[in-house]
Amino acid sequence: MTGHPTRAAEFIALPQRAAWHDQSLWFVRAKRDKAAKAIPEWESLRDAAAAIKAHTVANLADYLEEFERNAKKLGAVVHWARDAAEHNAIVLKILSDHNVKRVVKSKSMLTEECHLNPHLEAAGIEVVDTDLGERIVQLANERPSHIVLPCIHKKKEEIGELFHEHLGTDAGASDPQYLTEAARGHLRDRFLKAGAGLTGVNFAIAETGGFVVCTNEGNADLGVSLPPIHIACMGIEKLIPKAAELGVFLRLLARSATGQAITTYSSHFHGPRAGCELHIVLVDNGRSTVLGQDDFRRSLNCIRCGACMNTCPVYRRSGGHSYNATVPGPIGSILEPARDPAKHASLPHACSLCGSCSDVCPVKINIHEQLLIWRRELVKKGLLPLTKRWAMSIGSAVLQRPWLYQMVGGMGRMALKLLPRFLVYSRLNPWGKQRELPTPPKQSFRDQFKARHGK
Amino acid sequence: MASSRDAILATVRAAKVPQAARPEPFRAGIRYADPLKQFGESLAAVGGKMIVAPDADSARAQLLENPLLVPGKKNCSLLPEIIAPTFSLDDIADPHEVEDVWLAVLPGEFAVAENAAVWFSGRRLKHRVVPFITQHLVLVVPRDQVVNNMHEAYDRLKFGTVEFGVFISGPSKTADIEQSLVIGAHGARSLSVVMLG
Ligand code: SF4
């Protein structure tokens, strides 16, 4: 199986494109910084969010029951799904019971996680992703490469070509305004023809039985306000106790995601429209297992803002698709191995442990620490990638023998100084990819220490 | 076999997560010397336009300065004193029929200075699709109803009945194509907020 390094290598094979990708995401990261700095209470907001989440997961069963009770009181139908297959079966049954043939869907990482689209399509149902970025990757037959910016890896010229082929836009046209207008027309038609609207859930409120969906485009609202059926799919970790706590999370979410103070639309759904149906599907799919793991429980705090991706030096330079996962980037490298350790064994290593992800995370998940713990877990499970395995055994041999460590250190300093560039930056040395290696110090740390302390 | 519901709840309970107290409500939200002015700035930053008007006549006159808002196409209005509706929403059974609404004029309950959000409640609106499907949207908020931040906003909201409500901050937008901001993704292409009174 190919791991992250192989796929990342494919991405950086086009250096200009990799640099462009890196800069696009850094631009978003910079906007996030500016937005966070404009709020003097930013750090205490993050503390509050983490505390609310800690309290919620400690009482999750009670809050789930409270939510279900209140949602039913408002007239919603509440379903429970243990895993992806059950989730998909529930959604399909609702749709086939009503003979729905066309569905519009707004962004939902959960339905991606469950691979809902192919399941519905196999049953002859047309599913249209209505978020512009998601529609673009859907037309391209790809998966989103980022959870907030699904087609951040695509150039406008490529999108222009795709639209020319599928939507009949002018050949060679790549103006974002023009392309967006074309998508608006195309998707309006789908909104009007849909028999049901599907959405994800950003936050569900135990106290009220309602939930909130955030978008900039308005696609979730259009999608569920025309057809008679709204299906909302949510992981069980999306719960918060009270509506007042939305203040904390809505202030953090968009600022962390894109540097906006809030998304254009933050829609609060309490019960179905008159004469219509509202279905809420609560999905576990491994979350309750993570809940029982002290080391990884906090990964359930994630509000899917994407900030850890925008800041991650590895993500920015290797692209979302190199993770081969529903959720890429730092948090994905925790969530995905939890679901399938063998398939995603290379992900916790796609990390320099710089800790930038944990610094920006609005709900204060100790992301880089969990990544380190995952590496240990993978060793225990015998899932260490081969190259790492031998690097590790050499490393351990060296570290156990001080004389050898000194000798190897000397050799390294010498080599970096003397070797020609083509050898240092060759395929044999992955550390030379996409970065300049530092100028080696003249003396080892040991020698410097000795010199300073005169011993 | 236990139902999925019971199975999930049982696993969640068995996780034995260490107890953590629910934190006190967050009170340290940012405040502004002039919330109305801040609201106007926040709104401009997200591509919306604030109109301050002492009365309905002034509001109408200022709105009509924007040629896009000139009535004469299909208007949906809950505030006839500002812009007259061209049809009655209550006579329409199927929301698909409002597909071609050009301009919607709707009441907003209050506005939030920190992020230009206006709270709109669907309570008086027969078809909740209107603020999203219309090409241009006008929200009318009483001028003295501006709160500083989202904590103050939620202090004002009570949920518990069947209701749809939404914070709207600016016109619909996307930056999905190479991070270029485009106004008018799926929803309204323009948003004007009238601060009335
Ligand atoms: S882990 Fe934190 S930073 Fe990353 S997406 Fe989740 S909430 Fe955002």
Image (cartoon, rainbow, N blue to C red):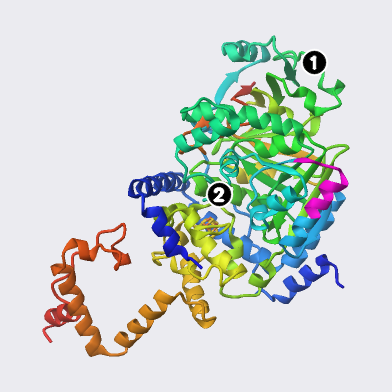
**Residue position for label 1:** B87
Q: Is the residue marked by circle 1 packed among few (<14), some (14-19), or many (20+) residues within 10 Å?
A: some
Q: Is residue A430 left or right of residue A144?
A: left
Residue A253, image x and y in percent? 56, 49
Q: CA distance from mark 1 to mark 2?
A: 42 Å
Q: Is residue A401 left or right of residue A452?
A: right
In the image, residue A240 above or below residue A407 = above
Which one is in front in this view, the residue at disc 1 or the one at disc 2? 2
Residue A283, image x and y in percent? 73, 60
Q: Is residue A2 visible?
A: yes
The span shown in magenta is A90-102
Task: Name the chain under label 1.
Answer: B
In the image, residue B100 above or below residue B115 = above
Residue at 84% over, 43% down: A277
In the image, residue A218 above or below residue A11 = above
Q: Which of B195/B115 is in front?
A: B115
**Residue position for label 2:** A144
Q: Is the residue marked by circle 2 packed among few (<14), some (14-19), or many (20+) residues within 10 Å?
A: many
Residue A451 located within the stretch drawn in magenta: no
